[in-house]
Amino acid sequence: MNDRELLLLDWLSAVLPAPPDRIAPASGDASFRRYFRVWYDSQTRIVMDAPPDKEDCRPFVAIGSAMHGLGLNVPEVLAADLDQGLLLLTDLGEQQYLAALGEHSVAGLYDDALDTLARLQVGGDPGTALLPPYDSALLHREMELFREWFLGRQLGLNLSEAEQHTLDHSFAALADNALEQPRVWVHRDYHSRNLMVTEAGNPGVLDFQDAVVGAVTYDLVSLLRDCYIAWPRERVEAWALAHRQRLRAAGVHGLEDADQFLRWFDLMGVQRHLKATGIFARLNLRDGKPGYL
C-alpha cells in the first residue's frame, strides 16, 4: 500500500461514521483522478482521490454545487479535504449510459439526457465568473493536440509547409464556427461514459469539473456523436433538431435557422473529435493508456 492509499484510509476513518467494510476501485478516467467505492453500514459512497500536485478538486466542488442548483443530478459532496485532494461523494451507481444504450432504451435515455442538457443550457448564466470562456485560445490548444500527438507522435508524420498551412486554416474555420454560436454553459464531456442510469433524476452527471461557457452545440455533439457509440445520421440529426426546438421554446435566442444549426453541429463535431483523437494519442504515448485508441 503506497503513501497515497494510506492517507486515503486515514482520512476515511476520520470522516465516515463507521469503519468501511470494503473499498474497491470504482473507475479511473483520462486524468490523474481515481475513484473508489466504499461500503459501510449497508451503504456505499464514492471517494475521489485527486493528488493536489496533479489535479485541483476545487472546481469540481464549486461547479457541482452550481449544477445541483440548476436541478442536475450530480454527486453531493459529503466531506472534503481540498488541500489533500480527497472528496467523499454520494454514489450515483454503477450503470453507465454506454452499457444501457440499445435500440429499445435509447429513446428514453436520450430524452432524459437532452432534458438535463437543456436545463444546464437554459439555466446557466453565460455571464458567470465561475466558468472560464471556451475562447479561441482554448479551442486552438485542443486542436493542436491532434497535430502534435496524433499526426506528429502517434503517426510520425512530418507535414509540409503547405499541409501545415491547410491545417492552420482548418483550425481557424472550426474555431470561428464555435465562436459564432450562442453561448451557454458547457459540461465539456457530456457523453455515455459520464452519464449514469439512475432511478430518480436520470441521468446522474459526472466529470463536470472542466465546464466552460461556450458553443450551444458542443455538449449536444458530445452526446449524439459520442466517441464510444454511433447512431445513424438521420437519427442524430433528428435528435439535434428536436433539441434546437426545445431550446427555442425555452427562450434561447439565435437558433432560428435549422440548416445553420446543423452546420454548427457538424463542424463542432469535427473540432471535438480532433481534440479527442489528440488526447487519446497522448494517453497512449505519455500515460500508457492505449485503450482509448
Image (cartoon, helix red, strand yellow):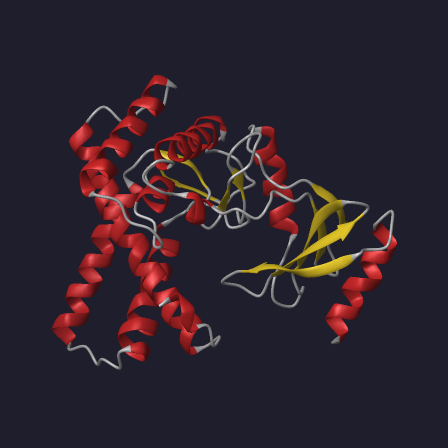
Left or right, 133 with reference to 160: right
Left or right, 56 with reference to 207: right
Q: Nearer the viewer, residue 131 or 187?
A: 187
The quadrant where residue 221 appears? top left
Q: Residue at x 38, y 35 (%)?
A: 110
The quadrant where residue 243 appears? top left
Left or right, 206 with reference to 222: right
Q: Nearer the viewer, residue 32 or 133?
A: 32
Determine if residue 14 is in view: yes
190 versus 172 height, above or below: above
Q: Position of residue 287 (x, y in %)?
A: 48, 75
Q: Position of residue 14 (x, y in %)?
A: 87, 55
Q: Residue at x 75, y 52 (%)?
A: 39
189 versus 248 height, above or below: below
Q: How many marks?
A: 0
Q: Residue at x 53, y 41 (%)?
A: 205
Determine if residue 189 is in view: no
| Most distant residue in the front direction | 104
Left or right, 192 with reference to 240: right
Q: Position of residue 37 (x, y in %)?
A: 68, 54
For the C terminus, give its image quadrant: bottom left
For the N terminus, give its image quadrant: bottom right
Q: Position of residue 97 (x, y in %)?
A: 45, 44
Q: Residue at x 46, y 43 (%)?
A: 187
179 versus 73 height, above or below: below
